[in-house]
Amino acid sequence: MEKQTQSPYYFSPRQRSTGGLPPPFQSISSVLIGCQSDQGVFMSRSLNKIMLIGNIGNDPEIRATASGARVAKLSMATNRTWSDRSGEQQEKTEWHRLTFFGRVVDVVEQYVKKGDRLFVEGRIEYSQTQDDQGVTRYWTDIVVNEMVMLGSTGGGNYGGGGGPEGEAAPSSSESGSTEPIDDLPF
């Protein structure tokens, strides 16, 4: 009987269901598995997804678009550290522009403030504008569709269209209390 050779892209049934990854990473593996053919080979779909954990650098700026939709804008700092060749610790801060749309704008407006720590998930969008002198300016925005407040008094998971837990963003009339949530699983 001849032994079958497995392609480097072969996934066992268990790997197909979980990607062979621990639970925090299974949602990513399900996205990747959704991009595979029946033979386990990745198809030519694309993915624009970013996840950040960082500190908010300014209070939210809330605006309305021409159509009346509300938009919240924030800046977020993320830090990375490394040792240089001499063994000395180095640190670099990167600043990201965050944009929120939909129901999550109400949560951002009510609960998020400068210094808060957030986890955000969304997509990268690039845009450009031209000023009066004809100079083109380029912008990179993170359009957030999921947000988890870390270490702030509001606490919670708020998504633009309902997150994995299906939790909707509370309005000011629904929330009732601004006391911290003590029954979080961590």
Image (spheres, rainbow, N blue to C red):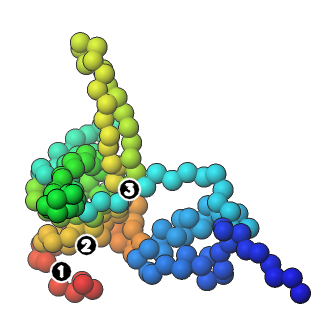
- Residue 100 versus residue 181 in the image, above or below: above
Q: Is residue 88 left or right of residue 140?
A: left
Q: Residue under circle 3?
A: 50
Q: Position of residue 76 (x, y in %)?
A: 20, 53
Could you say whether the residue bearing mark 3 is in a helix, strand or loop? strand
- Residue at position x 15%, y 72% from top? 151
Q: Residues within 10 Å of mark 1 (few under 14, many from 20)?
A: few
Q: Which mark is residue 156?
A: 2
Above or below residue 77? Residue 36 is below
Q: Quadrant of residue 136?
A: top left
Say whether residue 164 is left or right of residue 151.
right
Indicate which label's residue lies in the foreground, 2 or 3: 3
According to the picture, the residue beneath numbered tag 1 turns out to be 181
Residue 40, labelled with which disc?
Answer: none
Judge the density around disc 2: few (<14), some (14-19), many (≥20) Cα neighbours within 10 Å: some
**What amino acid is at disc 1?**
Ile
Q: Give residue 168's position: percent from left, percent from top.
A: 34, 68
**Discs 1, 2 touching: Cβ within 8 Å:** yes
Q: Horizontally, is 184 left or right of 177 in the view?
A: right
- Image marks 3 and 1: residues in contact by CB distance under 8 Å: no
Q: Residue 173 sits in which quadrant?
A: bottom left
Image quarter hosting the N terminus: bottom right
Residue type at tag 2: Gly
Q: Residue 183 at what x, y percent from top left?
A: 22, 87
x 21%, y 57%: residue? 85
Q: Are marks 2 and 3 in contact (CB under 8 Å)?
A: no
- Check disc 3: other Cα within 10 Å, few if <14, some if 14-19, many if 20+: few
179 or 151: which is nearer to us? 151
Secondary structure beneath label 1: loop
* Residue type, mark 3 in image: Ile
